[in-house]
Image (cartoon, helix red, strand yellow):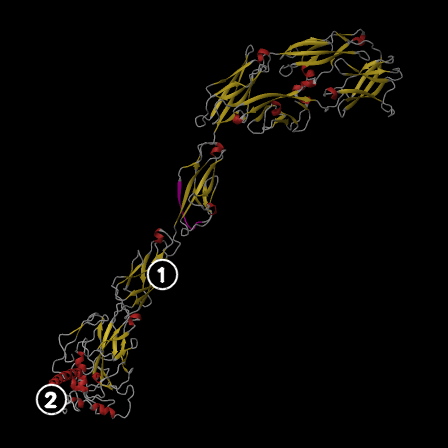
Amino acid sequence: YRLAEEGPADIRIGNVASDLGIVTGSGEVTFSLESGSDYLKIDNMTGELSTTERRIDREKLPQCQMIFDENECFLDFEVSVIGPSQSWVDLFEGRVIILDINDNTPTFPSPVLTLTVEENRPVGTLYLLPTATDRDFGRNGIERYELLQEPGGDGGRPRSSVFELQVADTLDGEKQPQLIVKGALDREQRDSYELSLRVRDGGDPARSSQAILRVLITDVNDNSPRFERSVYEADLAENSSPGTPILQLRATDLDVGVNGQIEYVFGAATESVRRLLRLDETSGWLSVLHRIDREEVNQLRFTVMARDRGQPPKTDKATVVLNIRDENDNVPTIDIRKIGRIPLRDGVASVAEDVLVDTPIALVQVSDRDQGENGVVTCTVVGDVPFQLKPASEGEGEPQNKRKYFLHTSAPLDYEAVRDYNVVIVAVDSGSPSLSSNNSLLVRVGDTNDNPPMFSQAVLEVSFPENNLPGERVATVVATDADSGKNAEITYSLEASPLSSEAPGSIFSIDPDSGDVSVQAVLDREQRDTYEFQVTARDKGVPSLQGSTTVVVRVSDRNDNEPRFMQDVFTFYVKENLQPNSPVGMVTVMDFDKGRNAELSLSIQPGDHDQAAGIFSIENDTGTIFSTVSFDREQQTSYTFKVKAVDGGEPPRSATATVSLFVMDENDNAPTVTFPSNSSYTVLPPSSNMRTVVATVVATDADTGLNADLNYSIVGGNPFKLFEIDPASGVVSLVGKLAPKHYGLHRLVVQVNDSGQPPQSTTALLHVFVNESLSNATVVESQVARSLHTPLAQDIAGDPSYELSKQRLSIVIGVVAGIMTVILLILVVVMARYCRSKSKHGYEAGKKDHEDFFTPQQHDKAKKPKKDKKGKKGKQPLYSSIVTVEASKPNGQRYDSVNEKLSDSPGMGRYRSVNGGPGSPDLARHYKSSSPLPTVQLHPQSPTAGKKHQAVQDLPPANTFVGAGDNISIGSDHCSEYS
């Protein structure tokens, strides 16, 4: 490649990939600049070669100092082509020829040039002028010289009138300025001239400089010195000591005197020539001034001028070529450099442990600055290490003193077994005696990220108290990584647990470096007692590996919650007659704390009136309240007390709740009939109209609700269906027409039932005496007394003799009818016979007589009441015929009301008739009895009289019979005249 010097950075030089025919773009093939990186760089992916920011100055390049040919100044570079994963590496060498630009101005040796010109020189005489030097070459070098007008002259005159400049081309291609005399010189008239000499190069734009040319007019010196030969060439061993003679330059001058005395000076010579060599001005001997190193300068080429001492002096020049001969004075140099993508710095190569066997890890360049056999070098790897050297190229044109090798792995690397290898490479040249050197490369086996961070526990359980301060540290999790370096540098982060989608970042945080887990919120165990999240540890390897552990934070309890009852007031309903020590209710209390802080102790606190003292107890485990007594609603309907709960925390917390206990009614009381009494009776006139109110049965019940909801019914003593009772009010009304057969005492068995389950009932007797008057009250009272001892299953209703008389009448009629039939038959027979004897006059059969002599006489007496009824003046009111009975008390006093009870042996009493005259029939005669009163035995279903509630009333004084159901069990071993 070709490149102009002094260019800016990033100048494109060429494309190595294109020039090598390598297809790029897939990223599998990459390029690496192995040498020449001071001035050059290459794109790793495209192979584009360009310049760096370091400026290239051709004139300052060490390798171009003594180069006079433009094509000889170049920069060498090396490019490695790397295959995928460095599976193969090719190394190529390249050269960039540095093209000269016009960056240097030509300059004269001195700003004032002095030239002596002898007088009387003919016109056209030539004088050589000192040449200018230009570090550039080619067309950028010196192109022309110009002689300007004399100072103070006319600005329009470019040339001098006495001298003229002529430029000649020398054999070696240089420009030689010459001053030509074109006018007469007379030292006596003028002994000096000052001219301006300008030199210009051929660059674009051109550079130029000028010097003062001072021309001194002297005597004539007409012969120039002459060298024996134009080119002197010699060999010089390098490292020759100073003062070592090299060669002698000889020149002769035909003149004599000072004009023939010759002195030798360096002509066109570089600074290095003047520094290394010494030229004796008088003898022309060239000797070593300083030691010369062939490896730095292998050849010196310069000119030497021979100048006489005439006025003006004449000169000649000769070229000297000095070749430096090599000596085996340099030990081999081992340069270990990186290759490809494996880094190498400060003698340390970092190689990943997972590289394949036979992978090149470094480029080893072995060189010897000597030449020939002195520069032939062999090298090898010393020691038992898994590395070996292989030539980088097999080309035959490779110089013997500069060889390149790849350092390959010869066995697998194991970071865990050996982390560092000190690879020593020894190089030996072929000189005599041979020289050797060594260099070492520390191969640091790089850890690949093949071990994930590991936690010591898969699940870390931490106990942390509630009511914390935000920012408190909960725990520290630590993970270890068997790798090293970045692969072992661990960062921690929080993630949601696989069993929970809740992100922990709002509550917990973790220090990514230390693993300290902190809580950012105040925890409340009662709201949540367990938090579970995952801590992930990631290393910084590429690719990154990670490990995780589950952190379970169990929030420990503090006694920060009081016991709490489910209700402020608990209301319980219990049935009365509950057995002692029975549960009556259960309170529910909870404490959101835990452990001892939630261990509750329950106790009964007395109420305002100490109602619960000794009556209630509470079971601590279940909250069940027990009673020590049996409740009686009729004694007390409700109880109120407090229950206190105390937890086991320190200090303890407590809470209370009110318990209201209501005793529910049970149907344990039978109805009680308050009116009428069993021994009382009511007189009902036979003329009473239908719907006449006979009496009202009044009953009460100590229970409440449905247990006290009473209904009334007539369950006995109403065979003629004359009476009806209202089920709700107990009003007994007449619903049938009264007939003569209904006269007399009616005993209605009234049953009062409550609506409890099972129902309770009471039976009462309502006596109704149907008659016009109450003239014979003692007889009615005796009948009432007998009815109290008559079985309830036996009806007492109306006149019992009425049916008996009807039976007797039927018998008599039957007998009479039979007799009459016999007599009639006899008469028929007699009449038949008589008729036969008489014609048509006789007895007519079947003709009824006017008087029936078979009719009993007592029927005439029965008509008397009807005559009395006809004698009544008008119709009586609905209640006008009801008789109130007043019976005598045992001590001779009178009963004031029918509601008062009769004694077991009632005495004779006086009776007042409310309405009715003395003519009313006395039906007491129908109730005479000669037999003792029968006994009534009751079998109630309710408790016996000795219990708490008296369910049975004694007869006859009491007025109720008690039964447990609708049916009344009644039995008797005796009969009655009523039957």
Front position in the image: 193 or 880: 880
Tell me the tag on residue 951. none
Q: CA distance from mark 2 to mark 1?
A: 125 Å
Image position, residue 705 (x, y; %): 31, 70
| Left or right of 465, for residue 759 | left
| Left or right of 209, for residue 560 | left
Q: Amino acid at mark 1?
A: Thr
Residue 631 visible, this angle: yes
Find disc 1 in the rendering and name its residue.
Answer: 656
Image position, residue 100 (x, y; %): 70, 22
Q: Quadrant of residue 51?
A: top right
Image position, residue 862 (x, y; %): 19, 89
Where 315 falls versus 947 (above or below)? above
Q: Residues within 10 Å of mark 1 (few under 14, many from 20)?
A: many
Q: Amino acid at mark 2?
A: Arg
Q: What residue span does the magenta drawing correspond to?
A: 459-468
Residue depth check, mark 2 versus mark 1: number of the one nearer the observer: 2
Q: Residues within 10 Å of mark 2 (few under 14, many from 20)?
A: few
Where 876 falls versus 431 (above or below)? below
Image position, residue 562 (x, y; %): 38, 56
* SS under mark 1: strand
Residue 891 visible, this angle: no
Tell me the tag on residue 836. 2
* SS under mark 2: helix
Front position in the image: 745 or 131: 745
Dominant secondary structure (helix, strand or loop) of the stretch shown in magenta: strand
